[in-house]
């Protein structure tokens, strides 16, 4: 069994605890938390499952000193990127296999800036660990899935990856209100939507698709649309969002190939379904991930996942985590290194069929 630590117990961390517990090759040995109110609680209680016999701790030194073979780094890197990088480098330096969605510039690690890549490579050389970064939006929807589906076409003109999402189900108020700007005045400039930021976050996935197709991206372009709420709305987890404030966002990161937008990652996010009803909507529920291959034939695939009840935001997190956690045993057998989604195979659910441990 591969001794595995889950670091963080938010939206991603809860799903990671469940995924590690369910994996036949992994053993959950520790859970790291930052919130003092969670210290001492059973990991299963934090993840919404039965008692797992693993008590949450905030003692990072002690957990890493035990030399775990793997770490699922589930703490956010959105507003604490430098801290997340330092944590991950530290874990890799102990010899652990680390999987995480937190370091988005390393989605396409081959083209990442040296100031981000070099510390990781140094830790790998020193400690013999590995790192695999894949997105939580989810990564498989912006790399391996579109590449797989593209192979079914005779001619491919455009590959479009969409995330369509109701943010009222996403339990990260600071990210929703301030990073993305939901509920803020329309003249507020959300950090996540500033020019260049979407390309910084999702450009690596555009380049991964291009690399898989064997084409060169000439440049990245961005589009952005925002809509105000026509009425005040109330949400279950984040309170009220006032009429006239930002209620929906639609943006694209376009990979330009031979002068045309050929690889597009598009996000359509709302705080309520009533806002921007003319924009793309999910087939049902709170959200979906969709891949559209414009060409001959035209191919469209929508994926809906639910977890923690019928919450499709949690379902998206769970599938992203499944991709990461499912890679751990492969990475543990591979040579130490820095890996991306084109390196790490998407694998069947070996040993999991009909098996629910918690």
Image: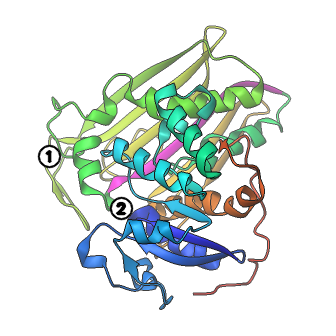
User: Of 183 and 338, which appears nearest the observer?
Assistant: 338
Q: Which residue is labeled 1 in the image? A: 243
Label 2 crowd bin: few (<14), some (14–19), many (20+), radius 10 Å: some
Q: Secondary structure at mark 1?
A: loop
Residue 78, percent from left and from top? 35, 45
At horizontal 32% and vertical 62% (from top left) the residue drawn is 171
- Is residue 165 a member of the stretch shown in magenta? yes
Q: Nearer the viewer, mark 1 or mark 2?
A: 2
- Is residue 241 a member of the stretch shown in magenta? no
Splitting the image into 4 quarters, where does residue 278 fall?
Answer: top left
- Horizontally, residue 33 falls left or right of residue 340, namely left
Compute the Cα span from label 1 to label 2.
19 Å
User: Of 353 and 31, which appears nearest the observer?
Assistant: 31
Splitting the image into 4 quarters, where does residue 161 fall?
Answer: top right
Q: Is residue 208 above or below residue 214?
A: below
Q: Main secondary structure of the magenta part?
A: strand
- Horizontally, residue 25 falls left or right of residue 204, namely right
Q: Secondary structure at mark 2?
A: helix
Q: Which residue is labeled 2 in the image? A: 169
- Horizontally, residue 106 falls left or right of residue 272, namely right
Residue 6, percent from left and from top? 49, 68
At horizontal 70% and vertical 34% (from top left) the residue drawn is 293
At horizontal 48% and vertical 33% (from top left) the residue drawn is 116
At horizontal 45% and vertical 48% (from top left) the residue drawn is 102
Colour mapping: rainbow
Residue 327, percent from left and from top? 69, 58
């Amino acid at each position: 069994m591969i001794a595995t630590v889950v670091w963080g117990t938010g939206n991603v961390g809860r799903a990671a605890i469940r995924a590690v517990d369910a994996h036949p090759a992994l053993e959950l040995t520790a859970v790291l938390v930052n919130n003092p109110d969670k210290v001492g609680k059973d990991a299963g209680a934090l993840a919404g499952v039965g008692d797992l016999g693993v008590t949450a701790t905030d003692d990072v030194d002690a957990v890493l000193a035990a030399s775990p073979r793997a770490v699922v780094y589930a703490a956010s890197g959105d507003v604490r990127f430098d801290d997340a990088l330092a944590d991950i480098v530290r874990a890799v330096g102990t010899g652990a296999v680390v999987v995480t969605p937190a370091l988005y510039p390393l989605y396409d690690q081959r083209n990442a800036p040296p100031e981000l890549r070099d510390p990781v490579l140094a830790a790998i050389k020193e400690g013999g660990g590995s790192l695999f970064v894949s997105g939580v939006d989810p990564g498989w929807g912006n790399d391996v899935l579109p590449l797989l589906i593209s192979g079914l076409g005779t001619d491919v003109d455009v590959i479009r990856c969409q995330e369509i999402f109701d943010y009222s189900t996403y339990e990260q108020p600071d990210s929703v209100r301030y990073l993305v700007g939901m509920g803020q005045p329309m003249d507020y400039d959300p950090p996540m939507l500033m020019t260049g930021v979407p390309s910084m976050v999702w450009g690596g996935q555009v380049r991964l698709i291009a690399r898989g197709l064997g084409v060169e991206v000439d440049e990245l372009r961005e589009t952005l649309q925002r809509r105000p709420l026509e009425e005040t709305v109330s949400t279950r987890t984040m309170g009220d969002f006032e009429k006239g404030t930002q209620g929906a966002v639609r943006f694209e990161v376009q990979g330009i190939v031979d002068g045309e937008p050929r690889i597009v990652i598009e996000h359509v996010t709302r705080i309520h379904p009533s806002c921007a009803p003319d924009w793309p909507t999910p087939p049902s529920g709170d959200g979906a991930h969709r891949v559209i291959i414009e060409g001959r034939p035209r191919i469209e695939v929508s994926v809906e996942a639910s977890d923690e009840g019928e919450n499709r935001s949690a379902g998206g997190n769970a599938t992203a985590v499944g991709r990461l956690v499912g890679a751990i045993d492969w990475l543990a057998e591979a040579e130490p290194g820095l890996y991306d989604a084109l390196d790490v195979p998407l694998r069947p659910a070996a040993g999991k069929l009909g098996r629910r441990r918690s």
